[in-house]
Image (spheres, rainbow, N blue to C red):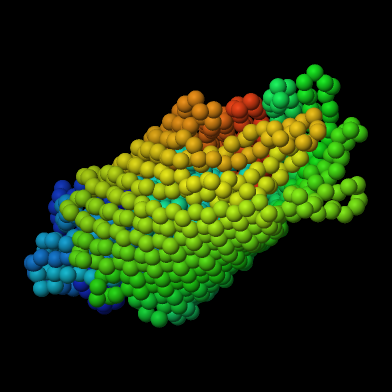
């Protein structure tokens, strides 16, 4: 939690504005906000007449920022701007920033001197709702602090609920400064007077916005940082990441502590690959791959490591919420982006918004067409029937992906207390990957065999989604809220894999093999939530939800007898399947505030019923009921510190491909098959976090522990029966899944954000933890100390130029049958603002030193393997962004004090 001063850019006005008539005009126009002006007058004169009563930090940050926000929120006249401008340019730097702030305050105080008499005395309470000014969505878990004036004594604090509401009670009559710190948003201040005659203050909706707000010659700037770390939650602002230009969501997530993304887009958090993906707060389509989701489609990415009862219990690693772009500014707004990368990489996107009266229409379209090259090397040794078989393989591959997406939606707000939203999306993902290998097979004392192989994969997938939301609040009962939503997702498409032997001995089987997967997934869901405050310090909430998964599909196996002829379907090896899963859920939670303490407890109940049938092999079913408790205790400490302890129980349900006994062939020697006896994995998660802020520096530390039982593990073994039946000198490897043993990871995460100069900002985060998994051989556990590190340095050499240099490192990590070796790399990017900030040119190079590659070592069950894969990671991108309508980005660097160097926005 931190407070960041708002920056004022002042532009001179005509001399006539400085005349006495201009002052009289200022007084007349200020009469509309007499109460606020009176509060300003008393506050500012106290600070001028008794400077020692104010700390330097309170004067510099609180007062100046509050003045700036009042100028924006109450729309004071441009004459005030002229006066402030005249002072700034005529003082010519002889006064410090604090003195200038007090001079500005003095002028405002003169305007409001006679606006109101002094307030009476009496008890009071304050309540309101924090909302995003763009989307008008609630801002949960924001911190609201109440300071008594004039000595800035901390009176109380509150944390907003999931619906953005907050309440402070038992407040003595006085004049106060109310400050809001919303995660990733501009700090906001309001002056509050509690007279005896009107002890209750209902602020209603308090809008917080990071974008610049123009008022005549004044620009108040407040922007989001690239990465915001709060206790239990990390927010990545994608637009601030220059290294995301032309990239994907997987590229952006590499910056988060304890997050790892492999070459297949699989995400793991703190060593767990069971991460629940959300799209705009709802479960994402099962076909969503982060390495195929354009970063240009996203506004922010939220990582929640220990979710409460209001979230689904699925995902032992936590939740990653992908928030797509949507504007709510008046008129036409939007942005267009085109990016080109080295060796055939192209992407485009367009985001538009139109707000008319009570309606807001939004839409986006994007396209991505990339080609990547890669290489791999495999050394594998296994013992089959007492004889040693060795495989040495090197290969090259080319991957082409083409994605198109369209999103349309509308919002209707018949009143301030009701809002309807309807959105629809359609995405198409095509992938074509060709891999050519040279394979050398050695079995026993016999001669080695050399083969030329080719593997082909063609994916043609689509995703359609429609969702509706309704939100209802009550002005007479602050904090009371009802929300309802329904979503229907349709995933589908085909996945075709082929394996060919292009050259080899005549005795080796030369028939090409093909598997065609035809997949359709229906995902309807509905949810209802209600929050009811008991008083200003207590509230309870309940909710119900139902998720349904219905998946009919087929897997056809075919062979090609000779080159150039049609593939012939084989009844043996072809399957039909049907999978259905229903998950009804309900939860309740309770929150209470007592002084500097905050408490929250919740309980979630979920029933899982599934039925899986594979023809002709058989069927499986499961009926499982579980409860998942969660609790949080937090305390606000002096000097802008906060301490929080949280606990939750969660689970990892296996997906349908892990359960149904359906073989999926990767190539002629490797396949995977599900396990009908597989059960969910359960985990206990505990976190102890501390956050402290001083001036513009924020330091967050988190101690965490994650302990899982019935851990779901992926196992690779030799299929001895299939190897014998094949009659070939090589062996066939089988990948399956099983519940065995326990896993644990516990350690420390640290995140630091600090400006080193007005033009230089440093962001560093890292994790160090011990990872422990049950050994596949059953002889104990495998464990090691591992971790991640990320360093980002942002420079602003000029007002319009920004440079980012970043590097990340992931230490070696143990797995049940071996370990993954370290991965590391460095990225660099720069952005130049053009045409008065109407456009921006971005140049970036990923993996500058070409060091990112994946190493895997396996050794268990008579099988030992070393696999190295290297994809094309060193890529240069050049992108051009054009901002449309009012969607012009602010020109200041994110959330920090600045000199005249300026910076960049998103």
Q: Where is residue 763 shown, x and y percent of the image? A: 44, 41
- Judge whether residue 544 can be spotted in this image: yes
- Judge whether residue 885 can be spotted in this image: no
Q: Quadrant of residue 167?
A: bottom left
**Residue under the point 44% across and 48% down:** 651
- The number of discs equals 0
Q: Is residue 110 above or below residue 776?
A: below
**Camera-nearest residue between 707 and 320:** 707
**Camera-nearest residue between 487 and 23:** 487
**Camera-nearest residue between 385 and 125:** 385
Q: Where is residue 609 shown, x and y percent of the image? A: 48, 58
Looking at this view, name the residue that lies furthest to the top.
445
Q: Is residue 896 above or below residue 724?
A: below
Q: Is residue 195 above or below residue 455?
A: below
**Residue under the point 24% across and 52% down:** 599
Q: Is residue 453 left or right of residue 826?
A: right
**Residue under the point 14% across and 61% down:** 171
**Residue under the point 47% across and 47% down:** 680
Q: Where is residue 6 shown, x and y percent of the image? A: 35, 56
**Camera-nearest residue between 822 and 318:** 318
Q: Is residue 367 left or right of residue 27?
A: right
Q: Quadrant of residue 641?
A: top left
Q: Is residue 332 above or below residue 626?
A: below
Q: Where is residue 830 shown, x and y percent of the image? A: 57, 46
Q: Is residue 415 left or right of residue 27?
A: right
């Amino acid at each position: 939690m931190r407070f960041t001063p708002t920056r004022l850019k002042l532009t001179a006005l005509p001399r006539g504005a400085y005349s006495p008539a201009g002052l009289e005009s200022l007084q007349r126009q200020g009469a509309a906000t007499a109460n606020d002006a009176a509060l300003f007058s008393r506050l500012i004169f106290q600070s001028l007449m008794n400077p020692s009563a104010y700390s330097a930090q309170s004067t510099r940050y609180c007062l100046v920022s509050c003045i700036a926000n009042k100028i924006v929120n109450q729309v004071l006249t441009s004459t005030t701007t002229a006066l402030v401008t005249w002072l700034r340019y005529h003082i010519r730097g002889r006064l410090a920033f604090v003195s200038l702030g007090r001079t500005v305050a003095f002028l405002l105080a003169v305007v409001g001197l006679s606006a109101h008499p002094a307030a009476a005395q009496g008890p009071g309470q304050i309540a309101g709702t924090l909302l995003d000014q763009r989307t008008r969505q609630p801002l949960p878990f924001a911190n609201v602090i109440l300071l008594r004036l004039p000595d800035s004594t901390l009176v109380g604090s509150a944390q907003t609920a999931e619906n953005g509401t907050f309440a402070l009670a038992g407040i003595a009559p006085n004049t106060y400064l109310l400050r809001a710190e919303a995660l990733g948003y501009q700090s906001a201040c309001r002056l509050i007077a509690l007279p005896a005659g009107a002890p209750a203050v209902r602020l209603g909706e308090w809008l917080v916005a990071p974008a610049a707000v123009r008022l005549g010659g004044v620009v108040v700037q407040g922007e989001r940082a690239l990465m915001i770390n709060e206790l239990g939650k990390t927010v990545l602002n994608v637009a601030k990441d220059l290294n995301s230009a032309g990239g994907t969501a997987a590229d952006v997530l590499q910056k988060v502590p304890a997050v790892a993304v492999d070459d297949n887009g699989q995400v793991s958090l703190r060593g767990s690959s069971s991460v629940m993906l959300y799209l705009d707060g709802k479960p994402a389509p099962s076909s969503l791959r982060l390495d195929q989701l354009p970063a240009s489609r996203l506004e922010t990415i939220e990582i929640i490591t220990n979710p409460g009862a209001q979230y689904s219990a699925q995902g032992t690693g936590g939740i990653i919420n992908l928030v797509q772009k949507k504007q709510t500014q008046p008129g036409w707004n939007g942005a267009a982006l085109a990016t080109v990368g080295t060796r055939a990489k192209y992407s485009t996107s367009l985001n538009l918004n139109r707000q008319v009266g009570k309606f807001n229409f939004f839409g986006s379209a994007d396209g991505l067409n990339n080609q990547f090259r890669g290489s791999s090397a495999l050394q594998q040794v296994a013992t089959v029937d007492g004889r040693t078989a060795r495989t040495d393989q090197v290969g090259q591959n080319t991957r082409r992906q083409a994605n198109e997406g369209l999103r349309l939606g509308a919002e209707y707000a018949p009143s301030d207390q009701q809002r309807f939203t309807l959105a629809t999306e359609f995405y198409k993902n095509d992938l074509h990957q060709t891999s050519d290998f040279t394979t050398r097979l050695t079995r026993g004392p016999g001669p080695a065999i050399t083969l030329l192989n080719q593997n082909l994969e063609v994916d043609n997938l689509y995703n359609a989604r429609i969702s509706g939301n309704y939100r209802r609040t009550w002005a007479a009962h602050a904090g009371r809220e009802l929300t309802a939503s329904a979503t229907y997702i349709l995933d589908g498409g085909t996945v075709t894999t082929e394996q060919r032997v292009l050259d080899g001995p005549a005795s080796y089987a030369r028939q090409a093999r093909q598997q065609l997967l035809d997949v359709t997934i229906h995902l309807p869901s509905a949810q209802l939530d209600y929050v009811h405050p008991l008083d200003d310090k207590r509230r309870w909430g309940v909710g119900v939800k139902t998720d349904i998964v219905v998946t009919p599909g087929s897997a056809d196996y075919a062979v090609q007898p000779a080159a150039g002829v049609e593939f012939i379907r084989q009844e043996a090896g072809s399957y039909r399947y049907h999978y259905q899963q229903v998950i009804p859920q309900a939860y309740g939670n309770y929150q209470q505030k007592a002084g500097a303490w905050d408490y929250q407890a919740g309980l979630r109940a979920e029933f899982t019923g599934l039925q899986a049938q594979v023809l002709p092999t058989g069927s499986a079913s499961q009926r499982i009921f579980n409860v998942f408790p969660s609790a949080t205790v937090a305390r606000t400490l002096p000097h802008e510190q906060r301490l929080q302890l949280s606990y939750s129980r969660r689970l990892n349900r296996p997906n349908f491909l892990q359960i149904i006994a359906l073989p999926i062939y990767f190539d002629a020697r490797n396949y995977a098959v599900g396990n009908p006896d597989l059960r969910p994995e359960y985990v206990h998660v505990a976190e102890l976090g501390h956050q402290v802020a001083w001036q513009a520096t924020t330091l967050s530390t988190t101690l965490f522990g994650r302990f899982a039982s019935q851990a779901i593990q992926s196992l690779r073994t030799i299929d001895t029966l299939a190897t014998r039946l094949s009659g070939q000198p090589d062996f066939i490897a089988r990948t399956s899944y099983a519940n065995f043993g326990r896993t644990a990871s516990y350690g420390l995460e640290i995140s630091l954000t600090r400006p080193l100069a007005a033009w230089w900002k440093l962001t560093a985060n890292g994790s160090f933890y011990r990872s422990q998994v049950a050994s596949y051989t059953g002889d104990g556990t495998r464990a090691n100390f591992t971790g991640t590190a990320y360093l980002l340095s942002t420079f602003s050499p000029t007002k319009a130029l920004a440079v980012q240099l970043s590097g990340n490192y992931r230490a070696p990590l143990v797995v049940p049958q071996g370990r993954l070796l370290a991965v590391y790399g460095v990225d660099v990017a720069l952005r130049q603002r053009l045409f008065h900030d109407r456009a921006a040119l971005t140049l970036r190079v990923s993996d500058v030193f070409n060091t990112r590659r994946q190493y895997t070592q396996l050794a268990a069950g008579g099988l030992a393997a070393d696999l190295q894969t290297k994809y094309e990671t060193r890529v240069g991108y050049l992108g051009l962004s054009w901002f449309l309508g009012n969607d012009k980005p602010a020109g200041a660097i994110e959330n920090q004090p600045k000199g005249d160097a300026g910076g960049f926005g998103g």
